[in-house]
Image: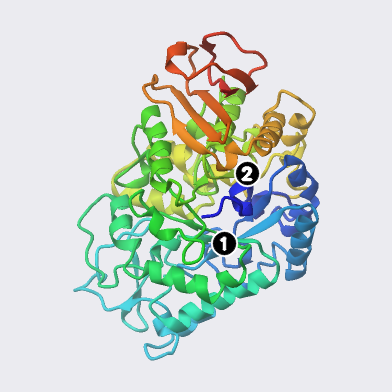
Amino acid sequence: MSNNPWWKHAVVYQIYPRSFYDSNGDGIGDLRGIIRKLDYIRDLGVDAVWLNPIYQSPLDDGGYDISNYRDILPEFGTLHDFDELVEGLHQRGIRLIMDLVLNHSSDEHPWFVEARSSPTNPYRDYYFWKKGRGSGPPNNWPSFFGGSAWEFDPQSNEYYLHLFSRKQPDLNWENPRLRQELYDVLEFWLKRGVDGLRLDVISAISKRTDFPDTYTHDFNETIRKYYANGPRLKEFITEMRHQVLNRYPACMTVGEGPGITPENALEYLDEQNGLNMIFHFGHMFMDQGPGGRFDPVAWSRSDFKRVFSTWNRALGENGWGSVFLGNHDFARMVSRWGNDGEFWRESATLLLTLLLTQRGTPFIFAGDEIGMTNTWLSRVTDSHDIETLNGWREAQKKGMTEQEFLARANYSGRDNARTPFQWSADRNGGFTTGNPWTTVNPNAPLINADRQKGDPDSILSYFRSLLQFRKSHPCLSVGTVEVVAHLPEQLFAYTRQIGSEKLLIVLNFSNDPLILDDSLLPGPRSRLMSNYSDVLPNRLRPWEARIEQL
């Protein structure tokens, strides 16, 4: 692979449109709200923006249930607004990455409306339909959102497959007509000036179509063995590449990959026949037990460090990955991996240092540049997320109390990441003049962009400086990475090198100071950047991050 494509040097800023900025006072973030904040985005120094889905949708799953792939949900705006957004980004030297859902549609999409109207309808084979087994579904596959992955349709006396919500029927990529419809969708957006595509759950477009029972109660293993990495996956991705993407050589593709493992990752990656990069979930699933999101298990710093080492080795020089510590599907970065209390600033800036110095393209979720934290649900009914609401229904069947479930949801639930962006100390955090679609985090008066803009010691200022530092040191984009071995559990250190330039990144992942034995680290070295204003010889303070020249 070439070392020069734009996406290898880029830093991507992810925006969840409903929660970014509301331009018209209806309580919902929109495209014109993003347009109004383009100068803020430019001043961050990022190279691209990734938008979560903005297509027409009944919003059963936050827009990942698309009912019209070629138009904008009216509450977000219009295609004219979209074109203006693309133009405004491009004028500022920023590219746009669209989020496309190709594994499933909404059950309100015209294809599915036709498909369920009759077993002989031409669109029937755009989806997966099967007779039940006895008095139940065709097999024992569980949904990502709880319950069975099959929904009974009384009209035709058959079940349809939905790996996610029952309102998100899975598309049948075995059908060549369906594939061509989706390729036409790609073409539609690329012609409008889109620079990249984030392909949602692309690892599942080829499934085990013999539909055997899963033999395991470990949900993540079920994903790997039955839902993802199917027998025709590589064929489908190659066809998509040749039919559409190769005619847009500057377009970047990143595949979301539940079920992708270090052993099979390179099968997805090829600039001419595959994807440019992937999202893997090695670290994001490490605190999930066999039951998934609401079955938390303990994790260690050693486990966390090992994920980065494992994936760096797996991708090597022949593949490319992404680096992310949070997004719309997970808890806030600083609350999950750091300390959002006593060492909020220190741990947030350390995590940003990790994000911008690891090998791969960094994706930062809007709000993490100011250290936004998890929210707090006091009742399950406060949640706006189908996964949490369905998870509570399943938890009740197991005898769990609401407070027990809330403890899990407040740790890992998706509501944490979807609270409105905190722009100022004004009402509703400056997000809207109306009533926000979901509750603004109560700490907005203390944690907001306005408060941090003029503070040279703020998380926002550190992020901007760090991003510029990254751009001035190419080794942090395309250099090799080597983890320093045999360190204390809380100490993570690695080198980045290209040619004669070699940097050492040192991170203290703990609330405790650490005596630094120089024999543990390569040297001699001199400090280039740190999240503390000064450096103590042979000592790292809590959550201290340093970048040093070797």
Question: From the viewer's perspective, is 290 left or right of 384?
Answer: left
Q: Position of residue 43 (x, y in %)?
A: 77, 41
Query: For the residue carrying disc 2, how many other residues have a C-alpha within 10 Å: few (<14), some (14-19), or many (20+)?
Result: some
Q: Residue at x 43, y 55 (%)?
A: 257
User: Residue 66: image x %, image y %?
Assistant: 55, 69
Q: Are marks 2 and 1 in contact (CB under 8 Å)?
A: no
Can residue 71 be seen here? no
Specify the quadrant of the image occupied by residue 412.
top left
Q: Work out whether residue 546 or residue 259 is closer to the camera in this orientation and state it.
A: 546
How many discs mark residues in the rendered view? 2
What is the number of the mark on residue 211? none
Q: CA distance from mark 2 to mark 1?
A: 19 Å
Between discs 2 and 1, the one toward the N terminus: 1
Quarter of the figure with residue 157:
bottom left
| 433 relative to 269, above or below | above
Q: Nearer the viewer, residue 548 or 325?
A: 548
Q: Is residue 496 above or below residue 316?
A: above
The amino acid type, in three-letter code, at marker 1 is: Gly
Taking the image as shown, residue 28 lies to the left or right of residue 524, namely: right
The type of residue carrying mark 2 is Thr
| SS under mark 1 | loop
How packed mark 1 is, by other alpha carbons closer than 10 Å (few <14, some 14-19, many 20 or more), is: some
- In the rendering, at what x and y percent does residue 166 appear? 42, 66
Q: Where is residue 324 drawn, in percent x and y?
A: 53, 43
Name the residue at 41% across, 75% down: 173
Colouring mode (rainbow / by chain / secondary structure / one colour) = rainbow
Residue under numbered circle 1 = 63
Residue at image mark 2: 439
